[in-house]
Image: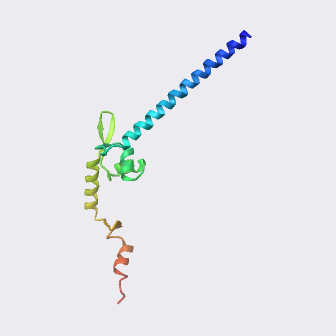
């Protein structure tokens, strides 16, 4: 009987260790969820945003943010310590300035490129033959 008691004790210790690990994982997960809920209850957005937050605010993917920075469609980020962040006010200003100089405009929420021959034909009809 003593051998089985020792096996049972070892099994109980193993189970307790697994429960401890599971408890720690659940506690960490709960803490992360609560922290995120605290972030969502902010009454104001952060001034400096990460690439993920910038993608969320611009309703695009992280890959789009990286591509637009490389193409010059978005400003380069700033380093704050080891954090890579964008000044969101600067991003808005940059986008507005870029759109103002591009000649492409939004007309009632629809992209309007004056050089587009299809749009030109729709707006003015086809040239009359004489």
Quadrant for the C terminus, please. Answer: bottom left
Q: Nearer the viewer, residue 29 or 47?
A: 29
List the single residue furthest toward the bottom: 130
- The picture places residue 127, in percent across and down from the top left corner, at 35, 83
- The picture places residue 120, in percent across and down from the top left corner, at 35, 75
- The picture places residue 33, in percent across and down from the top left corner, at 44, 38
Q: Nearer the viewer, residue 84 or 19?
A: 19
- The picture places residue 58, in percent across and down from the top left corner, at 36, 52
Above-or-below relation of 124 to 96: below
Quadrant for the N terminus, please. Answer: top right
Above-or-below relation of 108 to 51: below
List the single residue furthest toward the right: 1
Residue occupying the point 63% across, 19% down: 12
Above-or-below relation of 86 to 26: below
How has the structure been colored for display? rainbow
Above-or-below relation of 113 to 53: below
Q: Is residue 59 left or right of residue 26?
A: left
Q: Nearer the viewer, residue 127 or 24?
A: 24
Residue occupying the point 34% across, 49% down: 69
Q: Is residue 31 left or right of residue 13?
A: left
Residue occupying the point 42% across, 50% down: 61
């Amino acid at each position: 009987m003593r051998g089985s008691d020792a096996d049972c004790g070892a099994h109980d210790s193993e189970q307790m260790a697994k429960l401890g690990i599971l408890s720690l994982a659940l506690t960490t997960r709960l803490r992360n969820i609560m922290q995120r809920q605290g972030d969502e209850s902010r009454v104001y957005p952060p001034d400096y945003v990460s690439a993920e937050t910038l993608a969320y605010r611009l309703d695009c993917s992280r890959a789009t943010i990286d591509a637009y920075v490389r193409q010059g469609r978005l400003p380069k980020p700033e380093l704050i310590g080891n954090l890579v962040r964008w000044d969101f006010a600067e991003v808005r200003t940059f986008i507005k300035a870029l759109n103002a100089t591009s000649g492409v405009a939004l007309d009632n929420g629809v992209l309007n490129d004056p050089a587009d021959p299809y749009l030109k034909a729709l707006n003015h009809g086809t040239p009359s033959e004489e």
